[in-house]
Image: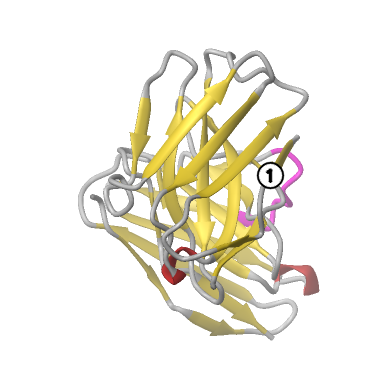
Amino acid sequence: QLQESGPRLVKPSETLSLKCNVSGDSIINTFHYWGWIRQPPGKGLEWIGCIHHTGDTFYNPFLQSRVTISMDTSDNHFSLTVNSATAADTALYFCARHPKTGPPDFWGQGTLVTVSS
Amino acid sequence: AIQMTQSPSSLSASVGDRVTITCRASQAIRNDLGWYQQRPGKAPKLLIHAASNLESEVPSRFSGSGSGTDFTLNINGLQPEDFATYYCLQDHGYPFTFGQGTKLEI
C-alpha cells in the first residue's frame, strides 16, 4: 500500500512537499522505482518522476528545475518537493510503484494540493 | 519526449457495446505501453501492461493490442462499471508520457 501525506494548502512561491509511506513492500526492493504523478483538476495525468534506492532518478523536463524526489530507507518512505509553487501546481498528487520494466502498477489514493494565498 | 496521441477524447456507448480506444506514439516504443482506467476522484487502475497483457483480476472483456507506434484498447460487452476515463502510458523511455484520456460515457 502507498499513502500520500502533506500540507493540502501551499502559498504561491513556497515549497510543496509530500511524503509517500509504503507498506507491504520495501523501497530498497531492487526491482522497483518509486515515483510521483499528478493530475490538475479536470485534466489528464502528468508523470513527474521516479527514484531507485541506488539513487538513480528521472524527472520530467517540464518540472525538472523545481522538483526533487528523495527517499528515506530507514522509514520506508519517499518524498516529493516542488519549489516556487504556483497555481499551476494545484493538482491531485499520486505516488506510485514503478516496476523496473513496465508501467506504474500500485498507486496511492492521491492527495489534493492547492496552491493559493 | 515521446508524445502519445489518444483518441477519441470522449465516447458515448451503451451497456453491451464493444468500444475501441487508440493511442499513437510519436516514435516506435516496441510494446512498452500500459492502459489505465480511472474513476472520478480515484487513482488510476492498471488494466494492461506490455500492450496486451491483462493484469490479474481484470475482466477478460478488456483486451489490448499493438506494437511500434499504434495501440488499441478494446472493451467487449460494456458493463455499467466500465464507464470511466481511460489513459494510455508509454513506459519505453523517460519521461513516461500519458495520452490525453478518453472519457467513456453512457
The image shows residue A95 at horizontal and vertical percentages of 60, 43
The answer to whether A77 is drawn above or below residue A106 in the figure is above
Q: Residue at x 52, y 56 (%)?
A: A38
Judge whether B64 appears above or below A107 on screen: below
Residue drawn at (28%, 46%) of the image = A65
Identify the residue shown where x is 48% and y is 51%. A15
For the N terminus of chain A, the image quarter is top right
Camera-nearest residue between B51 and B92? B92
For disc 1, the marked residue is: A4
Q: Position of residue B90 (x, y in %)?
A: 38, 47
Residue B4 percent across, percent down from the top left? 32, 59
Identify the subunit bearing mark 1: A
Instruction: Kindly state the secondary structure of the residue where label 1 is placed.
Output: strand
- Residue at 75% over, 79% down: B15
Q: Amino acid at mark 1?
A: Glu
- The secondary structure that most of the magenta stretch takes on is loop
Boundaries of the magenta span: B56-62
